[in-house]
Structure formats: C-alpha cells, structure tokens
Image: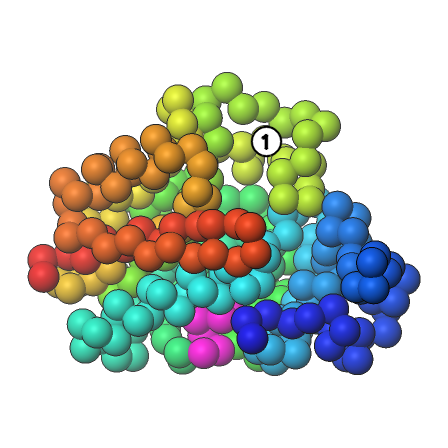
C-alpha cells in the first residue's frame, strides 16, 4: 500500500484523534483543517521515512506521497543512466525541505537546495538540522540558477523542482492554496498559464547540468495547455520523458529532460 491509512496513523500519533471522525463506517480526517493536514502529514513522513518535520503555519503543506513519488521517478531515470552518488540541486525547497530531505535520506546524494523566502529558509534549516542531514541551503535572492554565487561553478546530475505555476494575474487573497493563505512570494510563475518560471528553469538549467544530467519538474494535471507548452519548451533542450503519478483522485506529471543522451 502506498501511504498510511488513518487507522494506522492513529496508532503512531494520538494527537490525530481530535481531527478524526467516522462517516459511513470509515474513519476520515477533514483535510481542509490545516492543523489536521499538518498533523497527518507529519505522521506519514515520520512513520514511512523516519523524518521529523515541522510545517510552518503560513506555508503550503506538501502531500508526502506525491513528493516521494516525484523523487522516486527522478532517481529511476538517474539509475537507468548509470548515475550514482548524484550531485543534486532542488529549486525552491520551501519551509519543509521535504524533497531535499527525502533525496538525502533515501539516496544519500550530495544535495543543495534553494529558497527565496528568508523565513521559510530558516524553517527548512531547522528541519534539516533536526534530522541530522547534510544539505546545503542557499538563499536564491529571487534568482533561479543564473547569478547565484554558491553554484556558479557547479554542475549537477539532477536539478529538481516543483515549480510555481501561477499566472501573471494571480494575487494574494483570502483564497487558500494547498491549505495555506498564499504569500505574495509564492504566487509566481508568470504568463497566461503560469509557464514562464518553468521556461526560465529549462533555459537556465542546461548549463548547470552534467552530460546525461536530468532536469525533473512536477506539474498538476490541469490545465493541460500549461503542461503541453512546457513539454514543448523542454523538447528544445532535452530528450523528454513523462511519468504520470496518481494518488486518489489527483494526477500529477513528472516531466524529465535528459541532457545529451
């Protein structure tokens, strides 16, 4: 089974009891309640991966299993290409640093991770230290790859990112994104479909990847047009592979570009 049933999660975390209710004989959690979402995800990542993570109350709460599958699909490609002891860069690690920590924990890669929000950067640092993992955190200062001094002379086997994908007219408001009121710094992407950030990442990543290096990004299913034009853009630079991830009713796509195969 992929994930952790609520019945199992309760065995490991009694605090979940206050968020659990029964509906037609089944135990359920109201995941629109952010505290419930945080507590459940903390339990999943602790039980399944041995990581102790705290989530920032103002941040987006990443679904653990989708991030795990994202990492898994990315490393399956590296393994097929014969890449071992990978040098990895994550773009936008967020407050949880969950992708960077899963990579370090499961694959013992040499991991660098960037983040633009200084408050989230320090929160990520605390999570990494709590788990005794060696990951180099970098303040991106609003840059993607070009112009970041800490990586200007480095080349990576894998650059991985769940890129921001909000259109140019998205604004911070009372609307919730993934269980959190979106901060202005998170509402980036640009373009009609939020594709511009991904375009820049594709363009800039080429000179930061080793031969046979991989750029791996994940996108939600909708809108289809966003995914189509990002794949089209990636085809200009890389050989492209696409994997579909399905968890419950949600579909995501892992889009991987392989350099100079």
Percent across and percent down for residue 22 are: 86, 60
Q: Which residues are magenta?
A: 101-106
Pointer 1 residue: 184
Q: Farthest front residue?
A: 24
**Chief secondary structure of the magenta portion:** helix
Tell me if I can see residue 155 in this picture. no
Taking the spot 30% from the left edge, 71% from the top edge, the residue there is 76
Identify which residue, 27 or 51, lies in the foreground: 27
Considering only vertical position in the picture, is 220 above or below 1?
A: above
Considering only vertical position in the picture, is 80 above or below 29?
A: below
Res 213 quadrant in image? bottom left
Res 71 quadrant in image? bottom left
Q: In this figure, which colouring scheme has been used for the structure?
A: rainbow
Taking the spot 76% from the left edge, 73% from the top edge, the residue there is 7
For the C terminus, the quadrant is bottom left
Tell me if I can see residue 55 in this picture. yes
């Amino acid at each position: 089974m992929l994930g952790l049933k609520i019945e199992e999660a309760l065995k490991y975390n009694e605090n979940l009891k206050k968020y659990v209710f029964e509906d037609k004989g089944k135990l359920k959690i109201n995941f629109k309640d952010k505290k419930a979402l945080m507590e459940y995800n903390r339990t999943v990542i602790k039980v399944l991966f041995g990581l102790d993570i705290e989530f920032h109350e103002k941040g987006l709460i990443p679904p653990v299993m989708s991030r795990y599958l994202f990492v898994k699909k990315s490393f399956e490609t590296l393994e097929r290409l014969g890449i071992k002891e990978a040098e990895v860069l994550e773009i936008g690690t967020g407050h949880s640093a969950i992708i960077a920590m899963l990579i370090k924990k499961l694959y013992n890669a040499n991991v660098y991770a960037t983040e633009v929000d200084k408050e989230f950067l320090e929160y990520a640092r605390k999570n990494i230290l709590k788990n005794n993992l060696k990951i180099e955190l970098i303040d991106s200062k609003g840059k993607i790859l070009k112009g970041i001094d800490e990586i200007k002379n480095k080349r990576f086997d894998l650059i991985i990112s769940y890129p921001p994908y909000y259109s140019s007219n998205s604004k911070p408001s009372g609307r919730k994104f993934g269980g959190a009121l979106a901060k202005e710094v998170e509402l980036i992407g640009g373009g009609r479909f939020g594709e511009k950030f991904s375009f820049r990442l594709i363009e800039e990543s080429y000179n930061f990847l080793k031969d046979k290096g991989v750029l791996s990004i994940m996108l939600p299913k909708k809108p289809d047009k966003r995914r189509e034009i990002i794949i089209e853009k990636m085809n200009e630079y890389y050989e492209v592979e696409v994997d579909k991830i399905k968890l419950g009713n949600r579909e995501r796509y892992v889009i991987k570009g392989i350099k100079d195969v």
